[in-house]
Amino acid sequence: MKKKDELPNCPVATTVSLIGSKWKLLIIRTVFPEVPPRVEYALSELGESLRPLIEDMAAWGNAYKSMAGPADHS
């Protein structure tokens, strides 16, 4: 996890820097100290706090796809 002084000044850039990669193990991964190893993937309380943001991003993406023409997609 980044320290406060390592984060961008812009709050949107901060959010993108924290959730920008595909997997954020500090947010969503629980590892159990067992043999054989067992891992459960579920949202932590911190991850749950992102749910409204991710739902809004999904809605925006769906709206964009419905408005964009075939030539607008890469």
Image (tube, rainbow, N blue to C red):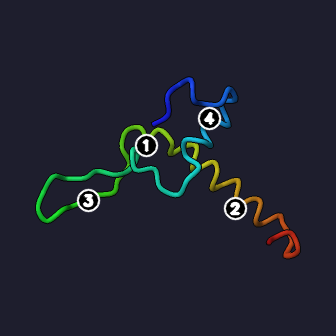
Q: Position of residue 50 (x, y in %)?
A: 51, 42
Distance, label 1 to label 4, CA atoms, is: 18 Å
Pointer 4 residue: 14
Distance, label 3 to label 1, CA atoms, is: 18 Å
Type of amino acid under label 3: Val
Could you tell whether 72 is left or right of 21 in the image?
Answer: right
Type of amino acid under label 2: Asn
Of callouts 1 and 2, which one flags the residue occurring earlier in the amino acid sequence?
Answer: 1
Of callouts 1 and 4, which one flags the residue occurring earlier in the amino acid sequence?
Answer: 4
Pointer 1 residue: 48
Pointer 3 residue: 39
Q: Residue at x 55, y 53 (%)?
A: 21
Type of amino acid under label 4: Thr
The local crowd at label 1, few if under 14, some if 14 to 19, many if 20 or more residues have their Cα within 10 Å, is some
Type of amino acid under label 1: Glu
Foreground mark, 3 or 2? 3
Tell me, yes or no, whether the two marked residues, 3 and 1, touch with CB atoms within 8 Å: no
Of callouts 3 and 1, which one flags the residue occurring earlier in the amino acid sequence?
Answer: 3
Q: Position of residue 36 (x, y in %)?
A: 14, 65
Could you tell whether 24 is left or right of 12 in the image?
Answer: left
Residue 68 bears which disc, if any? Answer: none
Tell me, yes or no, whether the two marked residues, 4 and 2, touch with CB atoms within 8 Å: no
* Location of the N terminus (image quadrant): top left
* Residue most extreme to the left: 35
Q: Secondary structure at mark 2?
A: helix
Of callouts 3 and 4, which one flags the residue occurring earlier in the amino acid sequence?
Answer: 4
Could you tell whether 18 is left or right of 57 in the image?
Answer: left
Foreground mark, 3 or 1? 3
Q: Nearer the viewer, residue 50 or 23?
A: 23
Q: Nearer the viewer, residue 20 or 41?
A: 20
Residue 62 bears which disc, if any? Answer: 2
Distance, label 4 to label 2, CA atoms, is: 24 Å
